[in-house]
Image: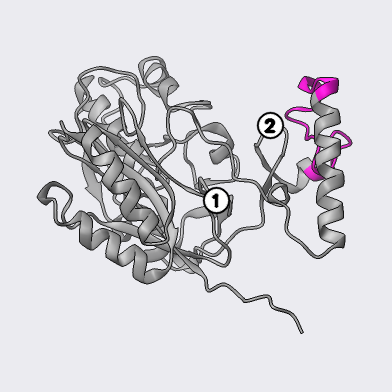
Amino acid sequence: MSDHVEQPPSLVAAFYRFVALPDYKDLRGPLQQRCEDLGLSGTILLASEGINGTVAGPEKGVRRLFERLGEDTRLADIPYKESWAEKPPFYRMKVRLKKEIVSMGVAGIDPASRVGEYVAPEQWNELIERDDVRLVDTRNDYEVHLGRFKGAEDPNTRSFREFPQWVDTHLDPQKDKHVAMYCTGGIRCEKATAYLLEKGFEHVYHLDGGILNYLESIDRESSDWEGECFVFDNRVTVDHDLAEGDFEVCPACRMPLTGEDRESPEFELHVSCPKCFHRLTESKRESLLERARQIELAEQRGEKHLGMRQAPPVDKDHSGSDQ
């Protein structure tokens, strides 16, 4: 008789708030301990400009965390996007101190004081289908590759720090009178709208709550979303029902893999994919081959190896909730 106990699904909560936190360094220790006491895992970023995070765990623990956050008036009633994961989407709990909760690298941009116009999911389709609106995806290229809104422009950025330069070379406040932007959970496009307003753009919009809020609010038949939505945890993607998607990540470069990637002769299970095949050193390849052997042995024993489904890539300048 097996002693295996089925784990209940984990509630996943993605959240952020731009708010002045001059004492953010003092918040780290108590917040880390609180999350651990509640049985939560995930990542929370703290900076002088606010808080940004994704946590997962027992529903009661997640709810209790937001109750406790609310004891600080600056963090009271933070909205968060919910989804569920059949397996824990994070391995541990980390509360980190950063210069920015989402790193654009441009001084003086303050979304807490000035941002673009929030657009509810129910009004989003009507806005982005207008001929006078430029629709821009503020996410990184590997995220856009897996799913996007119909007609959205892809800036082909590898990091959010590259986004301001793309704006400066591809958008013109004199010509582009209406610019709509979106991201996974809302934080990147909120900061992007603040940047555009600073550059003199007049009508700037962003999807309230991001893609996750849209998928939760709009049914498939009425949706302008195509593909799956990349998330920064072990689920890799979520589908239109916010259920875990079908994508995995390459163990070498940690980029998400499509069906086409898996069909490539440069794809080797647990070792490489077309994106990293030509960059692998021999020693790295040997290390990954040994890891693959350990994964196979674990599967034969009916055990789970941590390498079987890794967390997706994390932009070093953005590792919180946006997510």
Q: Who's the residue at 14% across and 56% down the image? A: 71
Q: Quadrant of the N terminus?
A: bottom right
Q: Quadrant of the C terminus?
A: top left
Q: Is residue 222 visible?
A: yes
The amino acid type, in three-letter code, at marker 2 is Cys
Q: Which residue is mark 2?
A: 253
In-front residue for pair 250/240: 250
Instruction: Give percent across and percent down for residue 239.
Output: 55, 60
In-front residue for pair 291/237: 291
Asked if residue 263 lies in the magenta stretch, the reply is yes
Asked if residue 218 lies in the magenta stretch, the reply is no
Question: How many callouts does the rendering have?
Answer: 2
Q: Which residue is mark 1?
A: 91
Query: Closer to the N terminus: mark 1 or mark 2?
Result: 1
Instruction: Give percent across and percent down for residue 114.
Output: 15, 33
Instruction: Give percent across and percent down for residue 84.
Output: 48, 66
Q: Who's the residue at 83% across and 44% down the image? A: 292
Q: Is residue 56 above or below residue 207?
A: below
Neighbour class for label 2 at 10 Å: few (<14), some, many (≥20)?
A: some
Q: Is residue 253 left or right of residue 291?
A: left
Instruction: Give percent across and percent down for residue 300.
Output: 87, 61
Neighbour class for label 1 at 10 Å: few (<14), some, many (≥20)?
A: some
Q: CA distance from mark 1 to mark 2?
A: 19 Å
Q: Is residue 240 above or below residue 112?
A: below
Q: Main secondary structure of the magenta part?
A: loop
The quarter of the displayed image where residue 176 is located:
top left
Q: Name the secondary structure under disc 2.
A: loop
Q: Name the secondary structure under disc 1.
A: loop
The span shown in magenta is 262-283
Q: Is residue 258 left or right of residue 189?
A: right
